[in-house]
């Protein structure tokens, strides 16, 4: 597919624009990519279409569902709460949420909860997508749930449930929803175009998600499908969330599921992480202290095999820590990626922040991610 790439790159970053355009030789439909370096936006690109039929052009301010990239944005809000002295990562969750202690969960710390070690990657009750919009139902189910493994002994990806856990902590401590807290303390001060809970006024500029089964080219299915860990369906298929029917609906966009349903674009993501890469400040606006960033990015899980995904992962207190150079060359880089390909991260060592958001989900797990191609091109330009 031939598209006209829009936006600008600073001198020396021309090759990033070339790599971005080349993604449409593959499966790309609509996307944006942005880089903030030393507080300056050096790459800001967008192009393609908002819909599968390629009739509505992607605009400079187009938003899209970013799935688990949302977890990184939410983790920044949690880091601010801790930096303000209102949350202690080493405290017990029950200190803030007493009902959470049922079924032997009374010794789980906040740090363990945020780093996917609490054994709550799913619930025993069969769920519908509509259940995910019922905040009280979900937090009550999680509070009553028996851990699926001994907390603190292993990590298993809390793909959807994670959003309710820090979300309820924020509500208990501040009286605000996590989406509102993120808006007030992160997005609005920085002028970042990102939302956890989309207002109706912004619905008209959100692109539709396109599932991996709808990609223009798809790999042949293996003769023997890979065996997924036993906890995979519990975490990711209860309920099954369809990219177009569910994740492109107004109900999904309005909800505040900080694990999976943020709406944003690359510029907004890179802006938020631009502050994190720059010691907590961007364009004269400070959202967090350097010390609070250090606390929030402390490693809690060291390259362990995840019980849900079966893959090794380094985890901090909500953030994914750089593994296999997914976030460039620095071991100190942190952020979060989302299903299908979106990503956002900060690299404090090089003062770099990157955001990538798209609507066509990756169909081939063995292909080099489009974001990775763009990340590598960016660091090549940085030298």
Image (cartoon, rainbow, N blue to C red):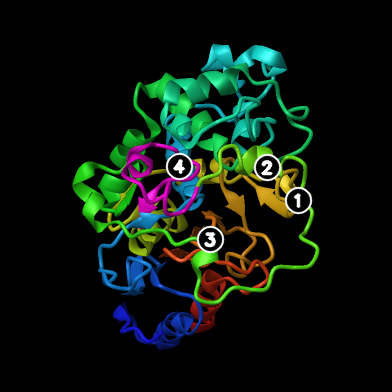
Tell me if mark 2 has few (under 14), some (14-19) or many (20+) residues whose alpha carbon lies within 10 angstroms of its own: some
First in sequence: mark 1 vs mark 3 = 1
Q: Is 209 a magenta residue? A: no
Q: Which residue is mark 3?
A: 340
First in sequence: mark 4 vs mark 3 = 4
Instruction: Tell me which segment is drawn in magenta.
Output: 242-264
- Which residue is the extreme one toward the left? 201
Determine whether label 1 and label 4 are within 8 Å by CB: no
Residue 381 drawn above or below residue 310: below
Residue 25 drawn above or below residue 86: below
Q: Residue at x 26, y 46 (%)?
A: 188
Which quadrant of the rendered structure holds the N terminus? bottom left
Q: Residue 122 location in percent, x, y?
A: 63, 33
Q: Residue 181 location in percent, x, y?
A: 34, 34
Residue 231 drawn above or below residue 2: above
Q: Which residue is mark 2?
A: 233
First in sequence: mark 2 vs mark 4 = 4
First in sequence: mark 2 vs mark 1 = 1
Determine whether label 2 and label 4 are within 8 Å by CB: no
Q: Residue at x 46, y 53 (%)?
A: 243
Q: From mark 1 to mark 3, how far is it between C-alphas?
A: 18 Å
Q: From mark 2 to mark 1, how far is it between C-alphas?
A: 8 Å
Q: Which residue is mark 1?
A: 228
Q: In the image, which is nearer the foreground, mark 1 or mark 4? A: 1
Q: From mark 1 to mark 4, how far is it between C-alphas?
A: 28 Å
Q: Residue 253 location in percent, x, y?
A: 35, 44
Determine whether label 2 and label 1 are within 8 Å by CB: yes
Element type at marker 4?
A: helix
Q: From mark 4 to mark 3, how far is it between C-alphas?
A: 19 Å
């Amino acid at each position: 597919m031939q598209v006209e790439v829009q936006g600008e790159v600073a001198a020396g970053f021309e090759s990033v624009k070339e790599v971005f355009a080349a993604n449409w030789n593959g499966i790309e439909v609509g996307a944006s990519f942005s880089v903030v370096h030393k507080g300056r936006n050096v790459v800001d690109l967008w192009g393609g279409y908002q819909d599968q039929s390629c009739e509505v052009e992607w605009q400079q301010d187009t938003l899209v569902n970013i799935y688990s990239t949302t977890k990184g944005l939410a983790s920044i809000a949690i880091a601010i709460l801790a930096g303000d002295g209102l949350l202690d990562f080493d405290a017990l969750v029950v200190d803030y949420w007493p009902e959470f202690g049922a079924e032997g969960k009374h010794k789980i710390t906040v740090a363990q909860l945020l780093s996917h070690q609490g054994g709550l990657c799913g619930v025993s009750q069969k769920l519908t997508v509509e259940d995910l919009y019922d905040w009280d139902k979900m937090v009550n189910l999680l509070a009553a749930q028996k851990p699926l493994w001994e907390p603190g002994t292993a990590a298993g990806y809390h793909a959807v449930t994670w959003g309710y856990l820090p979300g309820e902590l924020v509500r208990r401590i501040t009286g605000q929803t996590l989406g509102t807290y993120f808006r007030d303390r992160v997005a609005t001060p920085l002028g970042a175009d990102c939302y956890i809970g989309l207002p109706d006024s912004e619905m008209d500029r959100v692109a539709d998600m396109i599932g991996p089964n709808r990609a223009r080219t798809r790999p042949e299915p293996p003769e023997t499908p890979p065996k997924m860990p036993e906890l995979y369906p519990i975490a990711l298929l209860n309920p099954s969330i369809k990219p177009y029917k569910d994740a492109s609906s107004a109900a999904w966009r309005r909800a505040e599921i900080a694990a999976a349903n943020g709406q944003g674009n690359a510029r907004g993501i890179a802006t938020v992480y631009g502050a994190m890469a720059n010691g907590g400040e961007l364009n004269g606006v400070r959202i967090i202290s350097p010390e609070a960033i250090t606390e929030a990015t402390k490693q809690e899980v060291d390259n362990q095999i995840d019980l849900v995904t079966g893959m090794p992962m380094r985890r901090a207190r909500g953030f994914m820590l750089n593994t296999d150079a997914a976030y460039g060359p620095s071991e100190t880089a942190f952020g979060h990626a989302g299903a299908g390909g979106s990503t956002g991260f900060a690299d404090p060592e090089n003062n770099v922040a990157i955001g990538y958001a798209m609507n066509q989900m990756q169909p081939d797990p063995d292909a080099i991610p489009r974001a990775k191609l763009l990340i590598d091109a960016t660091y090549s330009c940085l030298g």
